[in-house]
Image (cartoon, rainbow, N blue to C red):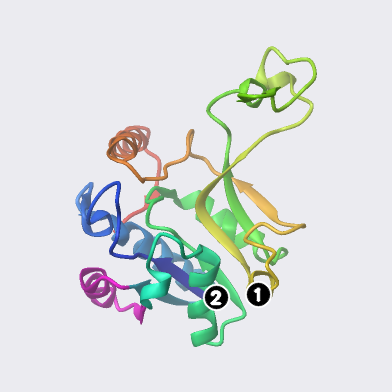
Amino acid sequence: MLIVVPARAGSKGIPGKNTKIFRDAPLVNWSFAAAKWLSNKLDAQVLCTTDDPKVAELARAMNLLVHNRAKQLANDTASMAEVVLDVCEATNSNNYILLQPTSPLRIKVDLERLVSALEKNPTVVSCTAPAEAPEDIIELSSGPIITGPKTETRQERVREYRFVDGAFYAGCVTNLKNGLGFSPAGTKFVTLSNPIANDIDTPFDWTMAETQHDWLVSQGVEFVRP
């Protein structure tokens, strides 16, 4: 098992995002901390793949492996599947857990549920309840995506809807090699405790994540932090 934290230097939305201080620690260190917590539970290696010397220095300071990411895998067109395959092949790993730095707030109980789910499922992906009613999503040229009568409350729904939030992906390298992606058929989805997903790409996302952090602290929620 290889726990992968990808953190490239380029970020158009927030320059230097991965090393920017998020609530007293560099953003990427939040994912490093979660990775180390998981590694202790799963007896797995943790590796940071990066083209950023500052990120590499932070990783080494936490005694993590560092993989120098090639230029062709550090641009806007490279897929995350290619990045994960690159490091898994370099380390002869058959299974991976992907922790993206853009999702820093990982509640401890959710990581415990990931560990538990991996005992019976080769592929586990995090998800979050959608902030808005899925029935209200429209395609501008054709109307509602979900057709049929709309339920008045979430509790009345026959089907439950979730949003794949990117907090963690765990799976088999073989599926990525075969082009099946991070959520192939049979994936076990774990609904997170967070009321909304945190995925930082813009300054607005950053501010919202800071606010969510402060709210979680005020509620006494225990999450893995640097």
Is residue 149 at all visible to an observer of this figure?
A: yes
Magenta span has 48?
Answer: no
Q: State the image coordinates of residue 174 (x, y, percent, origin top left).
A: 68, 75
The residue shown at (52%, 56%) is: 168
Horizontal relation, residue 6 to residue 121: left or right: left
Disc 2 + disc 1, Cβ < 8 Å: yes
The residue shown at (74%, 19%) is: 156
Q: Which residues are magenta?
A: 51-68
Element under disc 1? helix
Q: State the image coordinates of residue 20 (x, y, percent, origin top left).
A: 21, 54
Reply above or below: 67 against 134.
Answer: below
What separation in Å lies between label 2 and label 1 (alpha carbons)? 7 Å
| Amino acid type for the residue under numbered disc 1 | Lys
Which quarter of the rendered picture does the N terminus lie within?
bottom right
Q: State the image coordinates of residue 157 (x, y, percent, origin top left).
A: 74, 23
Read off the residue under disc 2. 85
Read off the residue under disc 1. 177
